[in-house]
Image (cartoon, helix red, strand yellow):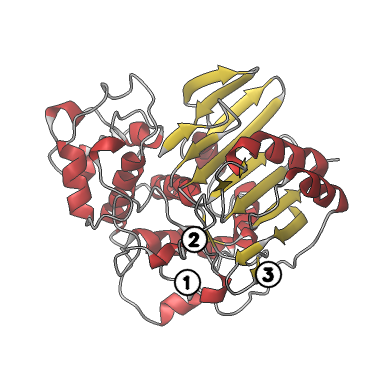
Amino acid sequence: MAVVAFATTGVISACGNGGGNGGHDAALQRADRPTAAATDERTDPLIQSFLNDTLPKGPGGTVVAARDGKLVHCKGFGLADREKKIPARCDTTYDIMSITKQFTAAAIMKLEMAGKLRVTDPMSRFVGPVPADKRRITLHHLLTHTAGFNDATGGDDYEPASRDGMLDVALKSRLQFAPGTKWSYSNMGYSVLAAIIEKVSGVGYERFLAEHLFAPSGMTRTGYVLPRWDRDQVAVEYDERGKPQGKPFDHPWAADGPYWFLRGNGGMLSTPNDMFRWHRALEGDKVLSADAKRKMFKPHVAIGERHGYKFHYGYGWGVIRSGDQHIIEHDGGNDWSYGEFARFPDHRTMVFWISNHTTMKGKWNLQDLLTELTLGIEKRTRR
């Protein structure tokens, strides 16, 4: 699923190979023990009062707000697991869905920093011979959803598919338009980018992210299978009737993570604490250079305007402007969960909120509250 949500209600929205094992994994990802940088839950009274008045009764989730690199609010609401009566917290693990795309884009930027590729390179340089209609597709086109791939020609998120199987489907598919001529949100394009990351780096997609993005950011509980998940800390997802749908890895997955119609474009697991750490990493140059971040956050492609907001897409991020307001964000959703990660660079503020129950049929839908929640939390964060 892929829609432009801020253009209608708020922001950009979308759905939603590890190498050998060994002691190195434990050094990268130790989800079974807190790190020295772990953040405690904290409550900002103004934000909490706003949430009490705005959130419907029923869903579980967590809200994080930060200003000037410091945590202002980090607190759960409702239950992460209703059957076990486990409350949602700052250290609850959620499927962050299409927010995953910013990690894929950052990995491409990291490889460009290392001189291993350039975003102007054609896709064919990395995936071998391609049909004539796809020879003009560059990494820039894949990153900005302008390659022309049609997700309808791919498989379901949980359909078994290998990396090469996914690439075969992508290369044989019919493009919606000539590369670079239009914009159409494409999960398949980001799965192709994940395959390119593996081919260029020589290691699995998740392992590359763990070593080059997550570890230097202090993110110990983000990934597919490398973290040692405590099952009781992973949120159960609920459908529109409130029925439990299990945890993300309870659905069909390969041994090393989601199958390839989901890998690279969604399905990453993370905690609100780790997403705060990612925000802090992006505020500095330790993980990505200033030049890499300028490319990633640049409004490369215009995708619409509504209510005075101009919407663009960067590399794995939506870029939104309205007058002097500047927002860099991405949200994610599937049939059960929904979340939003927004950064406001002019104010040095950040908002991340996520829920394991996006809608209750006939009663409420959190996606309808996207703009109100995100901007309302941010306003109270920078007071």
Q: Residue at x 48, y 22 (%)?
A: 303
Residue 30 seen by the camera: no
**Is residue 16 or residue 65 the one in the foreground?**
16
Residue 293 in percent (x, y) is at 54, 40
Dividing the picture into quarters, in which one does residue 217 lie? bottom right
Q: Nearer the viewer, mark 3 or mark 2?
A: 2
Answer yes or no: do the residues labelled 1 and 2 have beta carbons within 8 Å?
A: yes
**Is residue 359 or residue 6 the one in the foreground?**
359
Residue 28 seen by the camera: yes
Q: Residue at x 33, y 19 (%)?
A: 181
The quadrant of the rendering that contains the N terminus is: top left
Residue 85 in percent (x, y) is at 64, 72
Hey, what amino acid is under mark 2? Leu
The residue that label 2 is drawn on is 269
Could you tell me how far apart the alpha carbons at marks 3 and 1 are, in whole angstroms?
A: 16 Å
Q: Is residue 4 left or right of residue 57?
A: left
The residue that label 1 is drawn on is 227
Which disc number belongs to residue 151? none
Q: Please determine whether, in this image, residue 199 is positioned above or below residue 374.
A: below
Which disc number belongs to residue 38? 3
**Is residue 131 or residue 373 the one in the foreground?**
373
